[in-house]
Amino acid sequence: MFKILSNRPWLLAGGGFLFFVTAWVLFLVFATQHQPHVYKRGQEVPAATMAASAAHRQKEQAQQLHATH
């Protein structure tokens, strides 16, 4: 393996580039398939979602309050 890479160093660079492109494409596919649901204006939002959002907001505010004091 080392002998192949030492005689053809462009294989290492090309392999690294292909790895980067493959990882980027896989990330984009994963990110687009796991997008959060977006509620449009006027669309009814489930009560559980509203409660979870409010709880998360309160937790963030409490953390900011403790961080500043």
Image (cartoon, rainbow, N blue to C red):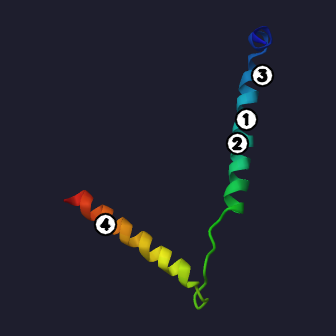
The numbered mark at residue 53 is none
The numbered mark at residue 11 is 3
Front: mark 1 or 3: 1
**Helix, strand, or loop for circle 2?**
helix
State if disc 2 and disc 1 touch (CB < 8 Å): yes
Which residue is rendered at x = 63% and y = 73% of the image?
37
Name the kind of residue labelled 4 in the image.
Answer: Ala
- Counting residues from the start of the chain, the first of labels 1 and 4 encountered is 1
Front: mark 4 or 2: 4
Q: Nearer the viewer, residue 42 or 54?
A: 54
Name the kind of residue labelled 3 in the image.
Answer: Leu
Q: Which residue is mark 4?
A: 62
Name the kind of residue labelled 2 in the image.
Answer: Ala
Mark 1 and mark 2: span between their CA atoms? Answer: 6 Å
Front: mark 1 or 4: 4
Q: Is residue 59 above or below residue 54?
A: above
Which residue is rendered at x = 75% and y = 28% of the image?
14
Instruction: Determine crowd level at label 2: few under 14, some 14-19, many 20+ residues with C-alpha closer than 10 A.
Output: few
**In this picture, residue 36 sits left or right of residue 2:** left
In the picture as drawn, the residue positioned furthest to the left comes out as 69
Q: Which residue is mark 1?
A: 19
Q: Where does residue 50 sit, x and y in percent of width and height? A: 50, 80
Instruction: Determine crowd level at label 4: few under 14, some 14-19, many 20+ residues with C-alpha closer than 10 A.
Output: few
**In this picture, residue 32 sits left or right of residue 63:** right
**In this picture, residue 18 sits left or right of residue 68:** right
State if disc 2 and disc 4 touch (CB < 8 Å): no
Name the kind of residue labelled 1 in the image.
Answer: Phe
Q: Nearer the viewer, residue 11 or 40?
A: 40
The numbered mark at residue 23 is 2
Instruction: Determine crowd level at label 1: few under 14, some 14-19, many 20+ residues with C-alpha closer than 10 A.
Output: few
Q: Where does residue 30 sit, x and y in percent of width and height? A: 70, 55
Mark 1 and mark 3: span between their CA atoms? Answer: 12 Å
